[in-house]
Image (tube, rainbow, N blue to C red):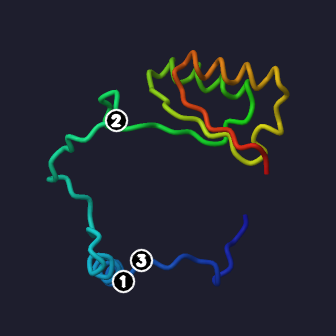
Amino acid sequence: MYKTPSSHTKKPLNPISIHLKISAIEKTGIPGRDIYEIPNSDRTFPDGAHYRIEISGVERPSTLEALIDEAIKRNIPVHRLISTVMGSTLLDKKELKSFAKMASDAKMEVIITPGP
């Protein structure tokens, strides 16, 4: 059985250090805890929605197809896709058109970078 060297053992969190961190955060004007009592915002996106779901790293039409299928299966709206890293350099013209059509049919906004 593998034994962790004593130099790598985790030390228990020091509760005082947590309080000091929270205090430091609060001094900057950021709440040190979740604020559940704040009212809901009346601000919305143009279609009336209060939030958006964005997924990055969708590089291939096959990945987009799987994402759309899973979003439908789980009834989760996905509003925007970001193709990063290699961007459009990974796809040929036919794949780009397929990618755009699938996203459009699923009512998903797409941002594709031109390349690295």
Please provide percent x and percent y for residue 103.
60, 23
Specify the amino acid type for callout 2.
Phe
Q: Which mark lies nearer to you, 2 or 1? A: 2
Q: Identify the amino acid type marked 1.
A: Ser
Camera-near label (3 vs 1) is 1
Hey, what amino acid is under mark 3?
Leu
- Left or right, 59 with respect to 107, comes to right
> Whole-percent x and y of residue 65?
66, 21
Q: CA distance from mark 3 to mark 1?
A: 8 Å
Q: Given this view, does label 3 or label 2 mark the residue nearer the observer?
A: 2
Q: Residue at x 68, y 38 (%)?
A: 112
Does the residue at mark 3 contact the one at mark 2 (Cβ under 8 Å)?
Answer: no
Seen at 53% across and 34% down, the residue is 80
When the figure is inspected, residue 114 is found, relative to residue 19, above or below; the finding is above
Asked if the residue under mark 1 is in contact with the one under mark 2, i.e. CB atoms within 8 Å, the reply is no
Query: Dividing the image into 4 quarters, which one contains the N terminus?
Result: bottom right
Q: Which residue is mark 3?
A: 13
Residue for point 34% across, 31% down: 46
Relative side of 95 to 57, left or right: right
First reached walking from the N terminus: tag 2 or tag 1: 1
Residue 31 location, quadrant? bottom left
Left or right side of 47 for 104: right
Assign a secondary structure to mark 3: loop
Q: Which residue is mark 2?
A: 45
Distance of mark 2 from mark 1, alpha carbons? 40 Å
Q: Nearer the viewer, residue 75 or 97?
A: 97
Q: Identify the residue under disc 1.
A: 17
- Using the numbered discs, state the Cα–Cα distance from disc 3 to disc 2 in whole angstroms: 41 Å
Measured as percent of width and height from the top left, residue 99 is found at 70, 24
Circle 1 crowding by C-alpha within 10 Å: few under 14, some 14–19, many from 20: few
Query: Of marks 3 and 2, which one's residue comes earlier in the chain?
Result: 3
Depth check, front residue: 68 or 94: 94
